[in-house]
Structure formats: C-alpha cells, structure tokens
Image (cartoon, rainbow, N blue to C red):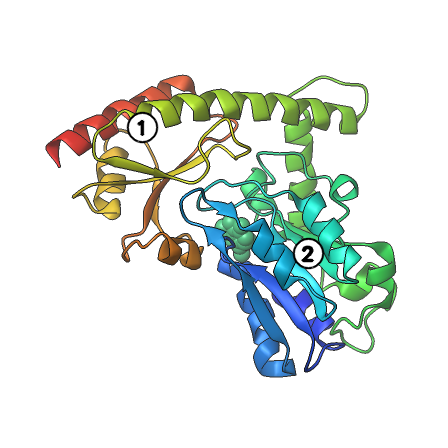
Amino acid sequence: MLFFHLSRALGRTCGQGDEVVVTELDHHANVAPWQALERERGVTVRMVRMIPETGQLDWHDLEAKITRRTKLVALGVASNALGTINDVRRAAELAHAAGALLFADAVHSAPHLLTDVRAWDCDFLACSAYKFYGPHIGVLFAKKALLQSMDFPKLLPAPDLAPERAETGTQNHEGMAGAAAAVDFLASLARGKTRRERLQAAFTELEERGRVLTNRLWEGLSRISGVKLYGPPPPECRTPTVAFTVRNVASREVARRLSELGVFVSHGDFYAATVVERLGLDSEGLVRAGCACYTTAEEVERLIEGLSAIARQG
Ligand SMILES: Cc1ncc(COP(=O)(O)O)c(C=O)c1O
C-alpha cells in the first residue's frame, strides 16, 4: 500500500512525456504502482531487462533507459526470487545524473544486509517489518525535503507537517512499537556501544553467517543431478535466498515433500512473476529456500539430503 501511496503522490506532478524506470527483476509490488501511472497520468513505464542466465540486472539496459525524461527509477535492493543484490548507489548516481529520483525496495534485503539510505543515497526506500522479525507494518523513508514538499494524498484536517503529512491515516502505534523492538532484537545479536554500532556489527555477522550457509547450500544442491539452480552463484553478491527446480518434480510437490522433513521452503513466483516468466518456467515456478538469522547448518544439510532423495525418486 505504501508503494501505491508514494506513486499516487509522485504521479500528481507527472504527465505525458514523463517516464518511470522499473526492472524485470522486481517484485510486482514495485511494478504495478508505477504502471498505474500509465493509465492514470499518461506516464510511460520502461522496464529494464534482467539477464536470465546470471539473474543479474542488465546494467547497460538500465543506463540506456534512464534519460532526461526519467522522473523516477524504482529498483529492488535485492531480488526476493533469486537473491541478486543490486548496486543501489550506482543506480542512484545514474538516476540523479539524469535529474531523476531513486526509489529502493528493501523489503527482501532488510533482514540480510544493513539498510543504509545515506550510503545508497536513495530518495525513497520502503521495507516491511515482518521480513525482519517484526510485525506487519510498512516503513517508508523519504528525504526530508521531499517529505516536506510532495503532494501526498491526505485529509484536509490532518497535519501538514513532515512526516505526518505522508501518513495514510491513524497511526499503527502497536506496529511501530513492534518494529522498533525488531530493530532492537537485530541490534542485540552483536556487541557495541551504540545501537548503530551494534546493528552494524550484527549485520556483518549475519552477512557472514548467510554467506557460509549459502555457499554450502549452493555447493550441495549443485551436485544433485536433476536440480537446476537460478540466480548469481556465490561468492557473487547475493542474499542467502536460493531458488531451484527439480527435473520431473513439480515445485509444489518438492515443497510438500520437504515439509515432511521439517524443512519449510516456498514455491511459485513469489509475485516476482516477470522473473519466472523470463526464466521460461511454467506456473509451478521456482522452489525457494531462504536462510534466516536462526537457520542452522544442520537444517541446510537436511535440505540437501532431502532434495537428493526427491530428485532420485523423481
Ligand atoms: C522485494 C519485495 N518487495 C515488496 C514486497 C511486498 O511487501 P508486503 O508483503 O509488505 O506487501 C515483497 C514481499 O514479499 C518483496 O519481497
């Protein structure tokens, strides 16, 4: 809903001749709100290609699609289907050089890598606290000047000061308290004097843990005949989210059989429908295994062994 709220607000100053750049790698939550501006405001949406073989964004195509007509570049920090991490800073530089703004979708990346709006220099960023062990509440960041000046849809009597003017109604206080507690939980995973220091240290550790688990998972799965892996292979920059298919076994069935071993994986397109389409997969889509902060090496071994048996039996 926050993505639509932002697109509606930005759309009020856009019209024919203006363009928004989105990518094939993205969750449709970061595509549909911008496509709505095509219908509502006559804006043109340009979609940057992904490279199916590597699961990476085609940066040449991104550079070509950002022009003086571009108002906004909407980019995922990381792909929720393939785990690809995008260089947000580089995209922000390209967008800003053309006079455009950058929106970063950090919903998938937030539990895996430190969200740093200053380092990335994004103009807007959104994430969902339930992805980083918190409650179901959305978070929207915008640079102060934008928050103060943008024409957000709001009720006339509602406060017109930033950030209240961007709120969508009565605030979700229990969600906000829960989201803050989730940040504290992440910070509690490491030591440091300030919360910022603890968070930085926690994410350094989480990234390293994720790397070790992903390396083992990727290596184990790539040895199983009939298993096909998608997305950037480690050690390339990726989240610990690994997508695969099993020859002659539907993804739904793979997920069902792994659940009998106490291994929870998801299947389908995870709303990253264009990724699945570009990979040439049918409606069964992918199987996706993700490592969270509590995932153990034993669970990774259980997944590898379970999948070996599933692939053998067909
Ligand atoms: C990359 C990405 N963007 C957006 C969303 C949508 O977020 P929400 O579930 O809070 O609507 C998701 C959800 O999985 C996601 O992974």
Mark 1 closeness class: few <14, some 14–19, many ≥20 residues within 10 Å: some
Residue receiving disc 2: 103
Residue at disc 1, CB closer than 8 Å to ligand 1: no
In-image side of 267 versus 27 (left or right) = left
Which quarter of the figure is the C terminus placed in?
Answer: top left
Residue at 86 percent across and 68 percent down: it is: 160
How far apart marks 1 and 2 lie (CA) works out to 35 Å
Residue at 31 percent across and 51 percent down: it is: 285
Disc 1 residue type (three-letter): Ser
Judge by depth and name the residue closer to the eye, 261 or 88.
88
Residue at 70 percent across and 65 percent down: it is: 67
Disc 2 residue type (three-letter): Phe
Q: Quadrant of residue 188?
A: top right
Q: Are marks 1 and 2 in contact (CB under 8 Å)?
A: no
Q: Where residue 263 sits: x, y (%)?
A: 32, 31
On the question of residue 2 being in view, the answer is: no
Residue receiving disc 1: 222
